Image (cartoon, rainbow, N blue to C red):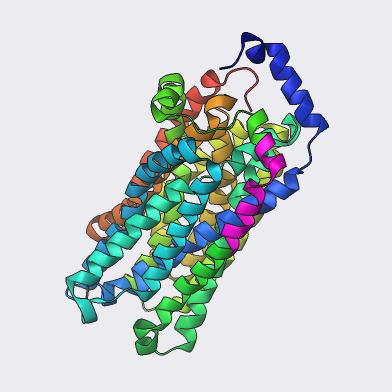
Amino acid sequence: MKSPMETTPAATASRRASRDEHHDVSPSDLAVGVIIGRTSEFFDFFAFAIAAVLVFPTRLFPFLPSLQGVLWSFVLLAVAFVARPFGMALFSRIDRRVGRLPKLTIALFLMGTCTVGMGLAPTWQSAGWGAIVVMTLLRIGQGIALGGAWDGLASLLAVSVSRERRGFYAMIPQIGAPIGLAVAALLFAFLVATLSAQDFLEWGWRYPFFVAFALNVVALFARLRIVAAPEIERLFEENELKATSLRATVAKDGRGILVGIFVPLATFAMFHMVTVFPLSWIYLYTRESLDSFLILEAIGAGVCLVSLLLSGLLADRIGRHRILLASAIAIGIFALAAPQLLSMGRGGEVAYMLIGFTILGFSFALSSGAIASLFDHRNRYTASALVSSLSWMFGAGFAPLTALLLSSSLGLWAAGLYLLSGAVATVIALIFLRQLRAPGRI
């Protein structure tokens, strides 16, 4: 039990001074670990998302028309997002009982097992309904693992730099997303372009899941090496970044958690509106070659990476809040006008993707940092993980399913309705964001 002296402002200042004096691990070391981990996670996600459009309607739902096959594949896509908060709760308990390192090891091992299992899973042609059940269970396992893969390095990174540089370092964890997308899109484009349709559907689609497993192994050792380092553990201790009980966290920071769920909602919905949804539209309603559109997605990921970096640089000059608010408004405008570009041929598709990825980069760069700023050190570790899981579920989990269902029923203009609702929710949440920030928070 801590003595009263340990929680005084003087004691806190002493701990922070000690951290500054003995800072053995540079922010760049933490950044490398975060980027590797995020790249692996997003590659896993995009490998499944692309397969959900190009493969699963034929190999898991061949008894359905193409549209219904893609919609049910998107249900599988959403399953992991629903499972993610439960995984976060489960692994938070493991973290409190046995520690961060065992928790992360178990979560990443489960992630790799489920990912390679997808590459080995049977299809409808060989196992009937059993194939759908197996893929659903693997997808649930992947979501639970992702909920437990929160390592706290992003939060630690944010408090390990001066206040004048926090906008830029808040952006760094997001770099893994466009890298993971670009690699997945180019790999699938290569397979689609070089294999016959029969070979791709028979065995070629499985290869990216084996690549994902290899990336998971690399990420596992890279992240464990950093998390297990004594100096990293000391930084976690000094910044009070420990797993706390969900009940205590919600009781202490319930309002911040509620607002935090909605702050990145538009960003996460936009994430799917420029990656998964347009691929499904091209697959179902055009005769365009899929490999060329996948290459366009990889180019869009490069544009997103550039706008990510610009957003991080601007954040420390004009403020994260302004960029997030402007980005949410831009997403709302994009939702109203842009989806119809997909019906205007190649030029419209290029405009849709490049504009969308540019907006996404500016918004996505700072969404996580804004969430972390809502919580004090004691609850930031658990509250950030909880908010991230719930935001991804509400914002991204059902976005491609809803957008495709609306657009196929009412027209492309309706695809933006879900995205527009997310933009409105984000703008409202940003209005409350400043009021919830306590002095001294990042």
Image point 42% across, 69% down: which residue?
116
Is 111 or 334 nearer to us in this picture?
Answer: 111
Q: Where is residue 114 in the image (x, y as percent from the top left)?
A: 39, 63
Q: Can residue 265 be seen in this view?
A: no
Overall secondary structure of the magenta section: helix
Is residue 225 covered in magenta? yes
Image point 82% across, 30% down: which residue?
21
Is residue 4 covered in magenta? no
Q: In this view, does 379 lie above or below 89?
A: above
Q: In which quarter of the image is the C terminus?
A: top right
Q: Position of residue 110 (x, y in %)?
A: 43, 58
Q: In this view, does 276 lie above or below 14?
A: below
Q: Quadrant of the N terminus?
A: top right
Magenta highlight range: 218-234
Q: Is residue 430 above or below residue 9?
A: below
Q: Where is residue 357 in the image (x, y as percent from the top left)?
A: 54, 56
Q: Is residue 203 left or right of residue 73?
A: right
Q: Position of residue 130 (x, y in %)?
A: 20, 70
Image point 38% across, 50% down: which residue?
144
Q: Can residue 397 be seen in this view?
A: yes
The picture quadrant where one finds residue 117 is: bottom left
